[in-house]
Each structure stands twice: as C-alpha cells, then as structure tokens.
Amino acid sequence: MSQAIYEFPLNEKVRTYLRLEQLFKQLVNANSGTEDWQFINFLSSLFTLLDLLERIDLRNDILKDIELHEKNLVIWSQHPDIDNEALQLSLQKILRLRESLKGTKKIGADLKEDRFLASIRQRFTIPGGTCSFDLPNLHYWLRQPPAEKLRCVKGWMAELAAMQAGVAITLSFLRERGRFNPIVAEKGFFQGVAEDKNELIRVISNTDEGYYPMLSGNKYRYAIRFTLFSPTLQGRSGVDSVVQFKLACC
C-alpha cells in the first residue's frame, strides 16, 4: 500500500517555514550537481528563497521558537526516564544556533549584494530568460570547472546555513508534538476542532485509491475533504465513500 504525508499549516508563520524547507531541499540537491540544468535550477530556487526572505524578517520568529524549545528541553531534563545525553546534545545545538542567529544581520543580505547573483537575478523572472543571449555571464560561469561551481554553491549556502538549521529544528519540534491516530471520514469528509497550540495538521493518506486530502479552515476549526484526482464522467470530484486515514494535530 502506497501512502503520502500531507501537511497543512494553520498560520502564516508555519506556512512560510514549510515553503522555506522545500526550497532548502531543492538547493541541497545542487551540492552534487554536474549538469547545467541542475545549477540553473539551484539558482532559480535560490532567488525564490531570497524573494521570500526579503518580504518578511523571519529571524525574530525563529529565535522565539528556538528559545521556547530551549525552555521545553530544560523542563524535560527533569523527567527521570529522559535520555539525558541526547537531550544535552539537542540543547547545545539549539544554544549554538541561537547565538549564530543573534550574531548575523538580515538573512540573505550578503547574497543580495553578490555582484554575479545580482547581475543575473532579474532575468530569472522572465520565462526562458536564462538563454546564452540573455545571460552570457551565466553561461560563462557554467563552463567553469565543476570544483569552482561547487565552491560558489557552498559559499552561497553557507550564508543561509543558520536559517536552514533554524527552520529544520523548529519544524522537527513542531512535528513531534503530534501523534498519528486512525480516523474514519464518512463520505470523504472530516471536521475537527484545533486546540490552542495546534499549528500544523498532518494527514497520512493512501495514494493508490484515486483521491487526496484538501484542508480548509483556520486555527480554531478545520475540515478535511477527500477529492478525486480524476473527476468522474459526471464531473463529480468529491469522494462519497468511507475513507480511512491517519491524522496528527501538532
């Protein structure tokens, strides 16, 4: 049986965290890139991430979340059955990350000032705008030795390392707050009430039965409706049968 995990944020902050996580995953794939298209995809994802970071300053949000995690770890350290060695490693990692974030200026500021990146960034917003006649300097860079290109990639990624680690730790703690429980959705529909601390709804659903979940709602109430990937001949897209899935409220 094939399954997938779907994640639905209940506030704008977590929505942004999830988008950043996805972009960071795309960037990491270029660390071992060898083809031109891989480096172009890397740069496209990098510019999308910088656009997102320029709209909002997430450093304060991540610092607040990290400080909350630190307090929780201190509380958990009093539990008699806790793995104290693992807890101390997590606490040290959080403390180092907190100091790193506090010691940096606006995330991505140095990348914005990079001469090469600034010279090609605007053309990436144009469909097909990365041809050699649009960006000869990009195609010159693509012809450089692989070691030189990877050196540049790792240098650019280093500027975002603190943010990447902060997002990863915050989402890890958030996901661990919820445990998956089996749910039955009559006629493909389920409605739930979010608790005060819920920020993320996670759904495990089969992918071999022709439907996927859609969530609507807010931080107080939410509804999950299962939708057919391929509508019926009559144009119906909603599932009208019983659906079994797993749900975690984080």
Image: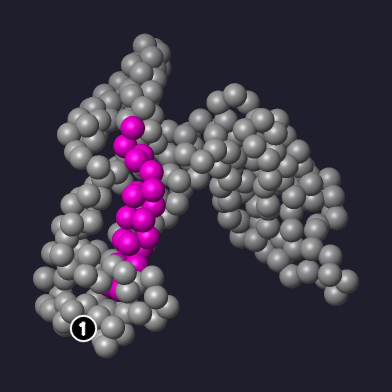
Amino acid type of the residue tagged 1 in the rendering: Pro
Magenta stretch, overall SS: helix
State yes or no: residue 53 in magenta. yes
Q: Quadrant of residue 105?
A: top left
Please name the residue that numbered disc 1 is placed on.
136
Please state the horizontal and vertical placement of residue 187, each as a whole percent of the image.
84, 50
Please state the horizontal and vertical placement of residue 233, each as a whole percent of the image.
85, 74
Please state the horizontal and vertical placement of residue 30, each as a whole percent of the image.
28, 66
Q: Looking at the image, how many numbered discs can be counted on the residues?
A: 1
Between 20 and 57, which is closer to the camera in this rendering? 57
Question: At x 32% / y 74%, what residue is drawn?
Answer: 123
State yes or no: residue 52 in magenta. yes
Between 240 and 222, which is closer to the camera in this rendering? 222
Please state the horizontal and vertical placement of residue 32, each as a whole percent of the image.
24, 67
Q: Quadrant of the C terminus?
A: top right
Q: Secondary structure at mark 1?
A: helix
As displayed, is residue 36 above or below residue 198?
Answer: below
Residue 237 appears in view: yes
Q: Which residues are magenta?
A: 39-60
Between 65 and 206, which is closer to the camera in this rendering? 65
Between 165 and 118, which is closer to the camera in this rendering? 118
Lateral position of residue 87 relative to residue 230, left or right = left
Question: At x 42% / y 38%, what residue is drawn?
Answer: 172
Determine crowd level at label 1: few under 14, some 14-19, many 20+ residues with C-alpha closer than 10 A.
Answer: few
Question: At x 62% / y 33%, what residue is drawn?
Answer: 219
Q: Quadrant of the N terminus?
A: bottom right
Q: Quadrant of residue 45?
A: bottom left
Question: At x 68% / y 45%, what residue is drawn?
Answer: 216
As displayed, is residue 56 above or below residue 50?
Answer: above
The image's colouring method is one colour
